[in-house]
Amino acid sequence: MPAAELDAALGSVERVLLDSSVLIAFHSPAELAHPLAEHLLARIAADDDPLHGSYSVISAIELLVRPIRTGLERFTFMHAFLTQFPHLTELSVDMVVAVQAANLRATMGLTLPDAVVVGSALLAGCEASITNDARWKQRGQPLFRQFTWIYLGDYV
């Protein structure tokens, strides 16, 4: 059972970073990882589950582009999801995050978007990074061992 295996991999983790690909899979029933993304977001929404999710403002930008192109109804839907989903928090960018991201970019050579995402997650105390992008895990895991790195494709 993939969801049970995913839960076992998360263990006692309470604060997770969901990257753009997980949020896209949640909204895309044709994605193979859709059922796992649904499971994760159901856990995050549950008041009796300690799992809470975070996403970077970079992910919010990525998720809003297509709805903006599509029209007001889709934009309104996605904006409401990003701002009202229970226990799912946007990691905003401020000067503290900017300094952290600049440090990561300068010392580790991360791209600017990746530096903002990782820097935000580190400062927010995220314990795990969950992705549906194998490259994100491959790049991040050796550099940031403080996160448990989870690739949904490993559980499909």
Image (cartoon, rainbow, N blue to C red):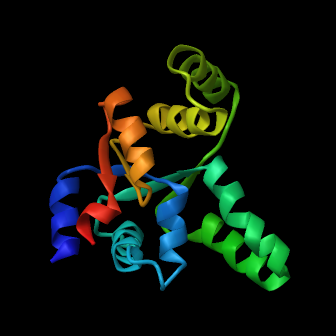
Toward the viewer: 30 or 45? 30
**Could you tell whether 27 is left or right of 147 in the image?**
right
Q: Which image quarter: residue 78? A: bottom right
From what the image shows, is residue 88 above or below residue 98? below
Toward the viewer: 64 or 11? 64
From what the image shows, is residue 143 above or below residue 76? above
**Could you tell whether 77 is left or right of 8 in the image?**
right
Count of numbered marks? 0
The quadrant the C terminus occupies is bottom left
Q: Position of residue 138 (x, y in %)?
A: 36, 42
**Could you tell whether 20 is left or right of 72 in the image?**
left
Residue displayed at 65% across by 43% down? 92
Residue at the limit of the structure toward the top, as seen here: 107
The quadrant the N terminus occupies is bottom left
Toward the viewer: 51 or 27? 27
Q: Which image quarter: residue 143? A: top left
From what the image shows, is residue 46 above or below residue 101? below
**Could you tell whether 129 is left or right of 110 in the image?**
left
Q: Position of residue 146 (x, y in %)?
A: 31, 31
Residue displayed at 29% across by 59% down? 50
From what the image shows, is residue 77 above or below residue 47? below
Q: Position of residue 69 (x, y in %)?
A: 83, 73
Residue displayed at 42% across by 61% down? 132
Q: Position of residue 39 (x, y in %)?
A: 33, 75
Residue displayed at 42% across by 37% down? 139
